[in-house]
Structure formats: structure tokens, C-alpha cells
Amino acid sequence: MEAPPPTATATATKLRLMCSYGGEITRRPRTNTLFYAGGDNRIVSIDLRSVTTLSSLLSHLSSALSLSFPFTLKYQLPHLDLHSLAPLSSDQDFHSLIHHHHRHHHHRRIRLFLFPTPLNICYRDSVPEVHLLPPPPLLYHSLYLLPSTLLSTYASLQPQLSFYPIPMNHSQSQSQPQSQNVSPHGQHGNDSNELDNDLARLQIYKSQPPPPPLPSKYVM
């Protein structure tokens, strides 16, 4: 005895889909038509009383097909080819799938394709933004001090560096006002002291590393 056909109530609460996964859509060499190559094909029965959303459908398919990787869904209507797969990415798409199933279940089953989610979509939020990158290093990190007595000579030798301000030290700034009040009788003693100070500054200047070269855009 043949089994009786399913009633309208049973059809309205059940969703039977042929699920294809593990393969890929490719073209035939001669006819250049699309077909699904490789993978597995299984009939999955879905109870619409418990599976009412897209997330519950994904969970049900993962359990029924023993899948451990994330995937996306597309389905093929009976009267269309593989060029016209419909996406299944929202609850509204899932309700449209149920509507098409109730219309075409007498002719041919709807075929559901499971495609692995690409890694660039899963981890696209982990790419660092441009504004989070560290700023470029400064061009100069050292401060070079020149004695005031050598400033004019150094500027004449290196005219392209003459616009850089050279700060004076504290002792030098205090010695200048006092030199104005020196009498002519103590001029020789002050000159010898200034000469000693200049020699000491010259030794300090020679002990410092040479200044870095200017960028090409500052060279005249």
C-alpha cells in the first residue's frame, strides 16, 4: 500500500530542502554552462514551528549537517539556473524562501547552497586603521650649541645654516652686561679671561658630534 500524500497542514509546517555543500560552482568545458561540482547533497527536513528565523535556520543546518565552519546561504528556484541564485541573509529572505517552497513543492524541491564565509569578511574589523599608526619620527633630536665668538665664523663658512637660532648659555648672557662697566685699566685682564673662556667653549664645541646635514630642499 502506498503512503498517503502529505496534508496541507503538514506541508505548511515542514520545509524539505536539498542542501549542497563542500563543492563549488564551475563551468562545463564545452557548453560553458554552470554546474555544481563535488561536495555532498543531502535532504534536510526543517520544522517551521521551531525554526522561524535565519539564525535558527543556520543553527539547525550546522547541527543536521555536522558543520563547524561559518557559511552563507543561497538558494535556487526550480525554474531558474545557477546564474540566478537568491541570497538568504535576513529573516525576510527566509520568509520568502518558505513562500516559494509552498508554491513549488509539487514540482521540484528548492536547492539550498552552503558556501564557506571568506576569511576577509570574518576578520575585516581586525585591520588597523590608518589614524592608529604611530606618527613618523622627528627629523632632528639633538640640540647643538655654538659659542658666540665662533658664530660669525661658522655662519660665513656655512651660509645655509645661518638662519638656525643658536641659544646662549647662562654664564655668557650674564657676562655681557658686566663687560660694559669695565674700566680701560682692566681691559687687558678681561681680554685674557674672555680668551680663556673662548678656548674652553671651543673645546666643548669640538667634543660635540657634528650637526646633521640639512635636507636637500634647504640647500641653496
Image: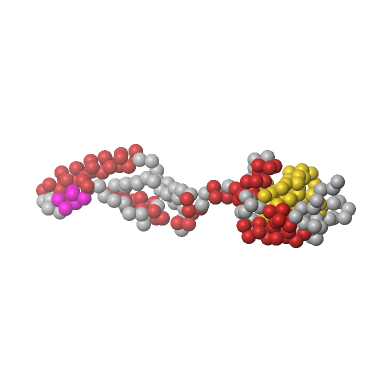
- Residue 3 placed where, x, y %? 81, 48
- Residue 150 placed where, x, y %? 31, 48
Question: Is residue 173 found inside the magenta-colored segment of the image?
Answer: yes
Decide which of 206, 5 is in the foreground and name it: 5
Q: Residue at x 48, y 49 (%)?
A: 133
Outermost residue, front direction? 1
* Residue 82 seen: no
Decide which of 219, 185 is in the foreground and name it: 219
- Using residue 65 as the reference point, say whether residue 53 is left or right of it: left
Magenta span dominant secondary structure:
helix
- Residue 137 placed where, x, y %? 44, 48
Q: Which residue is drawn at 34% across and 38% down?
A: 207
- Residue 14 placed where, x, y %? 70, 52
Q: Residue at x 18, y 48 (%)?
A: 175
Q: Bounds of the magenta span?
A: 172-178
Question: Is residue 50 found inside the magenta-colored segment of the image?
Answer: no
How many numbered marks appear?
A: 0
Outermost residue, right direction? 30
* Residue 50 seen: yes
Decide which of 49, 52 is in the foreground and name it: 49
Q: Residue at x 63, y 46 (%)?
A: 59
Position of residue 193 relative to residue 29, above or below, is above
Image coloring type: secondary structure
Residue 159 location, quadrant: bottom left
Residue 12 location, quadrant: bottom right
